Image (spheres, rainbow, N blue to C red):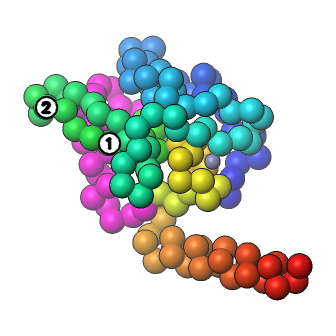
């Protein structure tokens, strides 16, 4: 479900927001301001394969730069509330390695709004996509 009243990006700091606001602000700087409360946060930064938003991050514990998917990073940041970049990266890897996927409920691949993605199994993700296709087909025929 898309939340009825998602918070605005600048209100979504988390309890460690002040200390680690650099990454969060950096990610937000790569999005367009939502035009209304339920609006998408379109990514204006780099895109990777499948046109998913990406960015590079220096991870102190690894002593190297890694490439992360922005919508997973923002979702992880706001749900796990890491205390530092190393912890954040571990949480990010946990989400990626869980085998679960972040389904874009708003069906906008460039959107990084954490309220617009939902953690689900790959099967559920495919089922939802099929449901949406069937619905589009249904309305196309009706028109
Ligand atoms: Zn969206």
Q: Secondary structure at mark 1?
A: strand
Q: Is residue 90 left or right of residue 64?
A: right
x, y percent for residue 76: 42, 42
* Residue linked to disc 1: 68
x, y percent for residue 127: 55, 78
User: Magenta includes 85?
Assistant: yes
Q: Is residue 141 left or right of residue 27?
A: right
Q: Residue furthest right?
A: 143
Residue drawn 47% across the image and 21% down it? 25
Residue 18 appears in the figure: yes
Q: Are marks 2 and 1 in contact (CB under 8 Å)?
A: no
Q: Secondary structure at mark 2?
A: strand
* Residue linked to disc 2: 64
Residue drawn 46% across the image and 38% down it? 74
Specify the quadrant that holds the N terminus: bottom right
Label 2 crowd bin: few (<14), some (14–19), many (20+), radius 10 Å: few
Range of residues picked out in magenta = 78-101
* Of 25 and 136, the residue lying toward us: 136
User: Magenta includes 22?
Assistant: no
Label 1 crowd bin: few (<14), some (14–19), many (20+), radius 10 Å: some
Specify the quadrant that holds the C terminus: bottom right
x, y percent for residue 46: 40, 38
Residue 91 lies, with reference to residue 44, above or below; the image says below
């Amino acid at each position: 479900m898309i939340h009825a009243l998602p918070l605005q990006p600048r209100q979504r700091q988390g309890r460690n927001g002040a200390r680690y606001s650099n990454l969060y602000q950096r990610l937000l700087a790569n999005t367009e301001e939502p035009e209304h409360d339920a609006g998408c946060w379109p990514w204006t930064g780099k895109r990777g394969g499948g046109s998913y938003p990406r960015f590079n991050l220096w991870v102190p514990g690894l002593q190297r730069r890694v490439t992360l998917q922005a919508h997973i990073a923002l979702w992880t940041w706001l749900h796990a509330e890491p205390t530092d970049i190393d912890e954040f990266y571990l949480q990010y890897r946990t989400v990626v390695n869980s085998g679960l996927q972040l389904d874009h409920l708003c069906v906008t691949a460039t959107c990084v709004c954490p309220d617009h993605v939902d953690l689900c199994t790959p099967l559920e993700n495919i089922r939802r996509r099929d449901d949406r296709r069937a619905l589009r087909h249904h309305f196309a025929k009706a028109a």
